[in-house]
Image (tube, helix red, strand yellow):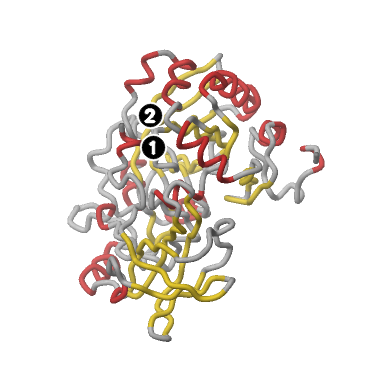
Amino acid sequence: MMHADEFGFGTQIRKSPYFDATVRWGAKGFSVYNHMYIPRDFGDPEQNFWSLVNDAILCDVAVERQVEITGPDAAKFVQMLTPRDLSGMAVGQCKYVLITNAEGGILNDPILLRLAENQFWISLADSDILLWAQGVAVHSGLDVRIGEPDVSPLQLQGPKSGLIMQSLFGDDILSLKYYWLRELELDGIPLVVSRTGWSSELGYEIYLRDGTKGDALWERIMAAGMEFGIKPGHTSSIRRIEGGMLSYHADADINTNPYELGLDRLVDLDMEAEFIGKAALRRIRDAGVTRRQVGLIIDADPLKGPNTTFWQINRDGAEVGKVTSAVYSPRLERNIALAMVAAEHAHVGHQVEVVLPSGPTTATVVERPFFDPKKSLAAA
């Protein structure tokens, strides 16, 4: 067993406040995300999936760094960053948003949290939005302060997560609605808790506001969850692909626009507020897109793990797209994938060829998400 203090690539890759705890609890492998280690392996991804969908898992997602925006012009500034209309966003509310550049390309797809009238957190996927926001602010003429606070989220996800939260925080936590947040304390540890997560299951994100308390918080939650079958875990590729949830850099990037992903609902071109990319997104909407994201069922032996390269998609001998995220779902007993294909092939029932590392095979375009399309589990 490798000791935590021997593990690492030097100081430029940051360790989370939960790093030592995850190693103690059996983390076998790490990836790098927002210049930090994230546990990606606790031994068996399929067992991790079943723990998530049947019971509960606790995941170190401190890599979801927060960009904190405060100051008198905070609300106006945050609206500049996203095409989603935030005019109705209340204090205590969370929203899934896209951050777009001047060409309408997606820079990040974070959760936005509004903690106070003039205090927002952007809870990031994997890209450097702290730098982008500070750059946007320079010539904006707006009075804002932008920085990375001492905030490190955990995800507690799965059908038993509500019972564990009740055990930790009392019955009142059950009234917390989907995509809302609360400021709370646990044993004197300052937290923000939201009903959000990256699993499409019932779940909570617990944002630690004091990095020195990471070990204590992790152990406290694991102890409270024992009677409910909690396991240390990692965000599940299987479950998030079943749920059609995006992984930034895989399913979307700076050259992808919201319309290609079918995320028109996150773009409001009719609001008065200006935001970066508005003119470009109007042009894209009016012209129509040349490619679209689809779901695929891939005919092949069960995939051994998620894809580590983009797999070419062909039709009639010509390249028409790429598989962006693929995995075997033990629940659906199918190889499922998210893919980007030329618009003329983006029709349910359409057949294409996917070039797997083992060779070409057939795949069929299907509806996404693959499971629980109404998100009834997460929003229950």
* Image coords of residue 352 (percent x, y): 39, 74
Residue at disc 2, secondary structure: strand
Name the front one of labels 1 and 2. Answer: 2
Taking 2 as reference, is 98 left or right? left
Element assignment for label 1: strand
Residue at image x 40%, y 37%?
201
Counting other residues with Cα less than 10 Å from the Cα at mark 2, is it few (<14), some (14-19), or many (20 or more)? many
What's the amino acid at mark 2? Leu
Indicate left or right for 162 with 58 as reference: left
Q: Residue at x 42, y 30 (%)?
A: 159
Work out whether residue 70 can be spotted: no
Mark 1 — residue?
A: 113
Pinpoint residue 174: horizontal percent, then vertical percent: 35, 20
Against 342, is 86 above or below?
A: above
Quarter holding the C terminus is: top left
Q: Say whether marks 1 and 2 touch (CB < 8 Å).
A: yes
- Residue density around tag 1, few if under 14, some if 14–19, many if 20 or more, within 10 Å: many
Which residue in the structure is indicated by mark 2? Answer: 181
Q: Quadrant of residue 197?
A: top left
